[in-house]
Image: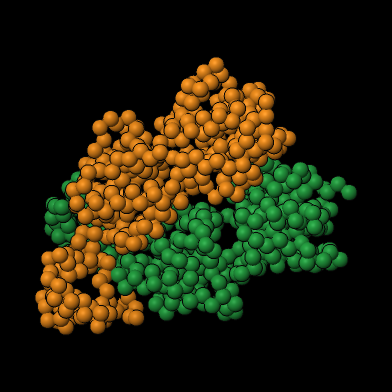
Chain colours: A green, B orange
Amino acid sequence: MTPPAQPGRLPTVRTVASLAGVSRQTVSNVLNFPERVGPKLQERVHAAIEELGYRPSAIARSLALQSTGLIAYRVGKSRGYEDQSLDPFMRELSRIGKDHHYRLVLQYAAEDDSSQITEYEDLYARRAMDAVVITESHPLDARVDWLKAHEVPFVAYGRPWGDPQPSHSWVDLDVEAGQRAATEHLIANGHRRIAYLGLPLDGARASAHRDGWAQAMGRLVPEQPLAGLEYLGSAEETSGLVARALEDAGATGFVCNHDGYADAALHALWAAGRTPGRDVAVVGFGNSRRARRAYPPLSSITQSVEHIAELVWSSLLDQLGGTGAPPLQELLAPDLAIRESSDFVLPS
Amino acid sequence: MTPPAQPGRLPTVRTVASLAGVSRQTVSNVLNFPERVGPKLQERVHAAIEELGYRPSAIARSLALQSTGLIAYRVGKSRGYEDQSLDPFMRELSRIGKDHHYRLVLQYAAEDDSSQITEYEDLYARRAMDAVVITESHPLDARVDWLKAHEVPFVAYGRPWGDPQPSHSWVDLDVEAGQRAATEHLIANGHRRIAYLGLPLDGARASAHRDGWAQAMGRLVPEQPLAGLEYLGSAEETSGLVARALEDAGATGFVCNHDGYADAALHALWAAGRTPGRDVAVVGFGNSRRARRAYPPLSSITQSVEHIAELVWSSLLDQLGGTGAPPLQELLAPDLAIRESSDFVLPS
């Protein structure tokens, strides 16, 4: 293969056109707008392309199509640290994108809207992105406003919190429903003093987790006051929170904001001389590999990142192709995978 | 801001040149090769750029420079699953790249060399990458040969296994030295029956981990046969392996291939009625957040992904800038962070 320093040696649209005996415009149409070209001409051009081993330069193609084949996706700190919980989603986006000749380009940016919008402005001004996938949606999301105003195709992973009539594409998990199901599962197994273990309620999503637990408790065990059963803190504080829930509230069950908290709770229970899966129940969220490998294996509220990524791509492709399909707006019901950490009836 | 459908409305090199009263070539030089332009001319051009709000199109710039500002990085399955252990490294590469106006583009590909080379061929033919960072180097690495043959700047995270005279840039951790240090630490605390818990030895890297343990054992406790102390398997098998090491070999200490194995070992020890950090010692590898949050907190062999990513970038920038600096070839000595999981003398 010829090195990039001698690009003139690579076959070009001109040499393809010459061999096929057609105009350069026809070659360009075959590559970019095949529906404008009859089947016989298409065949001639493709034969010439194959014979010459021609591959369109991404840059030249980009100029013609105003397309770079790149989908922007943010990485960076969230809540003060490099949060890896969405990395499986990013990997699925990347995997599916490959089938459609798109690649993810990582925009490293801080968590606040304006840092991310600065990245969009740069990528947009340079015409270096075709679409965006945003994560961690929140009320008054300025990124959504910017992307809509600039007509950049995008999908949000996260519902349009606080926006009653959203016009953009989004997909999200019904986390309340998931935490309700987890709490109901523990209540059905005889638990009453079920603690909620999670992030501080500084975002709509964290609150939704907590609300699902509170809804199930309020409906099924209304006599149980919730005040002493809410344990909120950072992941580092989990051990102390679990110890307090056991001592102060006599908790026998834990529903958790995510698998990391649930796994930390298992560690803390062993340390306190308890036997998770026999005298204390724990349910996580996310159904990660970590949940399946914990001891005992963790029950967890499941989200299929594959399915979510597929939905995101179907909407991106609709938008990129200008099909005029209505926006994706879907709240997915999560399932509960029941494993040893909670699959027992509380001894009375 | 003007939407992409009307690119003609955006300021161009021509309008900048006209306002500054210079040639378009001068504007291009100020943008791409400022060392060729005197300070006064630079000032005039920058004043015009600011007044017009001109931002060079990535595509036009790419055509001028044959540069896309993109560094290719592979994601995809390793050993059959989506291995996230290198994601912190990827994030650091992304973070540092931002400072130098580069972004990571993810190439989704299978683990074998030829799948990855197919991606390189595509990106190369489209001139859509400036450099590559490869991970998981291995003996007879065909990616290295391809990248050298095509003169694509690259750095390997992973030493050139089996290549006595490598000419390319690489950085790696001295994992043997790390596992030696972990094993010596346990021996110094009174342990003799120290088990190695890790991946099957199907790669040079996995073998290097195991060899570090075997070297320390052979030197300091040569009377201890190693045969019954080697526990190799997948992460799912960890619980069973730990139980066997306790029962069959009477192991009192574990050195582990990575923190995930060590964390699983802690779970298995609690489940077996043991007290890690008091009667059994465990040391992990990677010094991840998971190690710090485990109960008890895990001793771990530390690798600074920040430092590694900085070294990678210094070499990439040397190569991209054509400085002629010698290749990066550095084997880094890891440190051992001692925490509660191993910081005790074995009761005799």
Viewer-nearest residue: A102 or B225: B225
Kindly identify the residue that appears in the image at 54 percent across and 35 percent down. B256
Quadrant housing the C terminus of chain B: top right
Q: In this view, does B336 lie to the left or right of B314?
A: right
The percent coordinates of residue A113 (x first, y second) are: 47, 72
Kindly identify the residue that appears in the image at 28 percent across and 65 percent down. A62
The percent coordinates of residue A169 (x first, y second) are: 51, 70
Residue situated furthest right in the rendering: A348
Viewer-nearest residue: A109 or A10: A109
Q: Is residue A295 visible?
A: yes
Q: Is residue A348 left or right of residue A274?
A: right
Q: Decide: is A344 above or below B161.
A: below
Viewer-nearest residue: B249 or A278: B249
Quadrant housing the N terminus of chain B: bottom left
Q: How many marks?
A: 0
Kindly identify the residue that appears in the image at 31 percent across and 57 percent down. B70
The percent coordinates of residue A325 (x first, y second) are: 48, 71
Q: Decide: is B10 above or below A115.
A: below
Q: Decide: is A110 above or below B317.
A: below
The percent coordinates of residue B48 (x first, y second) are: 20, 80
Kindly identify the residue that appears in the image at 20 percent across and 69 percent down. B31
The image quadrant of residue B160 is top left
Viewer-nearest residue: B254 or A102: B254
Q: Can residue A175 be seen in this view?
A: no
